[in-house]
Image (tube, rainbow, N blue to C red):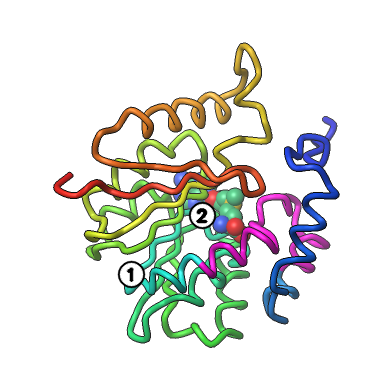
Amino acid sequence: MLKPNFENMDLISPIVEQYAEWMTNEENDLLSEINKQTNETHAHPHMLSGHVQGRFLSMFSQLLQPKYILEIGTFTGYSALCLAEGLAKDGELHTIDIRHEDVELSKSYFQKSPYASQIIAHEGNALDIIPLLGHRWDLVFIDADKVNYTNYYNLVLDRLSENGCILADNVLFHGQIFDNPVKGKSPLAIKDFNEYVKNDPRTSQVLLTIRDGLLLIKKEKNA
Ligand SMILES: C[S@@+](CC[C@H](N)C(=O)[O-])C[C@H]1O[C@@H](n2cnc3c(N)ncnc32)[C@H](O)[C@@H]1O
């Protein structure tokens, strides 16, 4: 079977993407190593958040200074390390992935970082693990299987702290949510998720057109 060419589905023109990269702070050496090695050796390198989105995650986390971060979908650890840059001094980042190889690889990168003692990597199905974690989350990054985005959202919403936020990745799904009719499980699930959040009175949200779309969600007061 032919490998899908994700480059052809990029929503942002290469010149805009290049300019955004140029005008954005550089990655540190460890992030640059993860980015390079993932692109050279992983079968699905397009899943990595990348330079500009990574700097956004880092800056957003630094502004929020979260004590507890939950990441759903670790992959090779790139976004976890970006989010960890904003952790409070005594904070913890919990990250979950179902693939053993990715969990082990991400752990090896976490060990090389200043956040080794603050990042807790969980291996298994996020649907099973999230209910076992007792924290109130200040920041949640949803970036795993698209068919479960609405389930993840509902699982974490009651566990968000008062000013807690959720960021959900790939909410434009390479533009496939604009097809008419929308085909395929993941784009359909993302389209349903976006509409579910939009119609949910418990939250307010803004869709950011960074990379493949990031949905920033905040719980309403008294929700
Ligand atoms: C898009 S990648 C995450 C990318 C990463 N956040 C980054 O930006 O570098 C999605 C990850 O979710 C994981 N995943 C898929 N289904 C899962 C599930 N049910 N529970 C936990 N992890 C899952 C995959 O193994 C994959 O590594």
- The tag on residue 15 is none
Q: Is residue 20 above or below residue 120?
A: above
Quarter holding the N terminus? top right
**Magenta stretch prevailing secondary structure:** helix
- Give the residue type that dot 1 points to: Tyr
Number of residue marks: 2
Q: Is mark 2 within 8 Å of ligand 1?
A: yes
Closer to the eye: label 2 or 1: 1
Front residue (pair 22, 34): 22
Q: Which mark is residue 68?
A: 1
- Indicate the quadrant where residue 195 lies: top left
Q: Residue at x 37, y 29 (%)?
A: 196
Q: What's drawn in magenta, residue-wise?
A: 35-59
- Residue 218 in the image: state x and y as whole percent: 33, 49
Whether the residue carrying mark 1 lies under 8 Å from ligand 1 is answered with: no
Dividing the image into 4 quarters, which one contains the C terminus?
top left
Above/below status of 86 relative to 44: below
Measuring from the top left, give residue 92's x and y in whole percent: 37, 75
Which numbered dot is residue 73? 2
Q: Is residue 114 above or below residue 165?
A: below
Residue that appears at 67% across and 61% down: 52
Query: Would residue 34 appear left or right of 91 to someone viewing this image?
Result: right
Q: In which image quadrant can residue 27 be found?
A: bottom right
Residue at the far top in the pictured view:
181
**Does residue 56 belong to the magenta stretch?**
yes
Against 144, is 185 above or below?
above
Residue type at tag 2 = Gly
